[in-house]
Amino acid sequence: MKPKTITEKTNLHPRNLDRFGYDFDQLITISPELEKFVSINEHAIKTIDFSNPEAVKALNKALLNTHFGIQKWDIPANYLCPPIPGRADYIHYLADLLASSNNGIIPEGETVQGLDIGIGANCIYPIIGNAAYGWSFVGTDIDEKAIQNCKKIIQNNPNLIDAISLQSQTESRFIFKNIFTPEDKFTFTICNPPFHNSKEEATKASIRKINNLENTRTKNPVLNFGGQNAELWCEGGEIGFVTQMIYESAKYPMQCLWFTTLVSKKENLSSLYKTLNKVSAVDIKTIDMAQGQKSSRIVAWTFLSQEQQKAWKF
């Protein structure tokens, strides 16, 4: 049976390199270890088993090498293995947002500095942002093992050494405190916050996801995307985390052009908008994203007027 050509994934950003699906032949040429995980499904399309964590990691290694020039990348067992196209979309929509404050031109280069809140062990947003636009990043996390793994990724890929710096957040209840210094000016913040209130809630969601992927029933899933507690759950869940982020952002109004975060649960938006109005955010934007059947959105806010945005030094 001849494999079918994959049609364009129009829900991905126009600049997303995976918009026309995964070119498994090319990926295998660059990363041969992927080949053993690839099969042809009932629709005559090459794919992998997305419920197999080793297959997902092999795909990620191949994509990072092929698209972003990352020669060596790995994560410890049970850490979040992110879907690359969705993470890339966040970066591309963020680039469009920055362009809106820069006469329609996407700002590029190392003077555009992002702050990645909760960089995780995978270092994914800084990798993509640096490869696509030459941006530099500060990555923070409360998990020292995650920070150490990012350090290893950076050391193994010399092009990242001057582009990404890392900082441990020593007080888990804070987000920007201890990170922002009086001299700091960040072009943007980026964040994929913990979704869930507890480990139990996170496990239930993972079981649902695995069952949907496999079309089977299981009570003990092998988590294909992994995730430690700091990555998947925190007290107060997504809404608690983002609300805290908004209140803290108001303490650094002139030190960041755009504060941004993913918000996975649409029902959280109205509460977050109220909080943003309470802290007198000047401009609030919601950017819808979709990957496969999953929809998400970026919420972005700034305390700078239009004039101050135009005057921002990129």
Image (cartoon, rainbow, N blue to C red):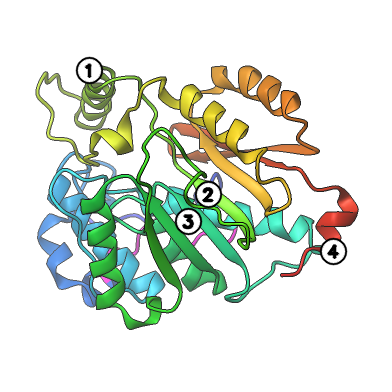
Magenta highlight: main SS: loop
Does the magenta run of residues contain 151? no
Give the structural element (helix, strand or loop) at label 4. helix
Q: Please, is residue 296 above or below residue 170 in the view?
A: above
Q: Earlier in the sequence, mark 1 or mark 2?
A: 2
**Which labelled disc corresponds to residue 88?**
3
- Range of magenta residues: 13-25
Q: Earlier in the sequence, mark 1 or mark 4?
A: 1
Q: Image check: 214 left or right of 159? A: left
Tag 1 near tag 3, CB within 8 Å: no
Give the amino acid at mark 4.
Ala
Whole-number angstrom distance, CA of label 3 to CA of label 4: 28 Å
Whole-number angstrom distance, CA of label 1 to CA of label 3: 29 Å
Give the amino acid at mark 3.
Ala
Tag 1 near tag 2, CB within 8 Å: no
Residue 47: in sight, yes or no?
A: no
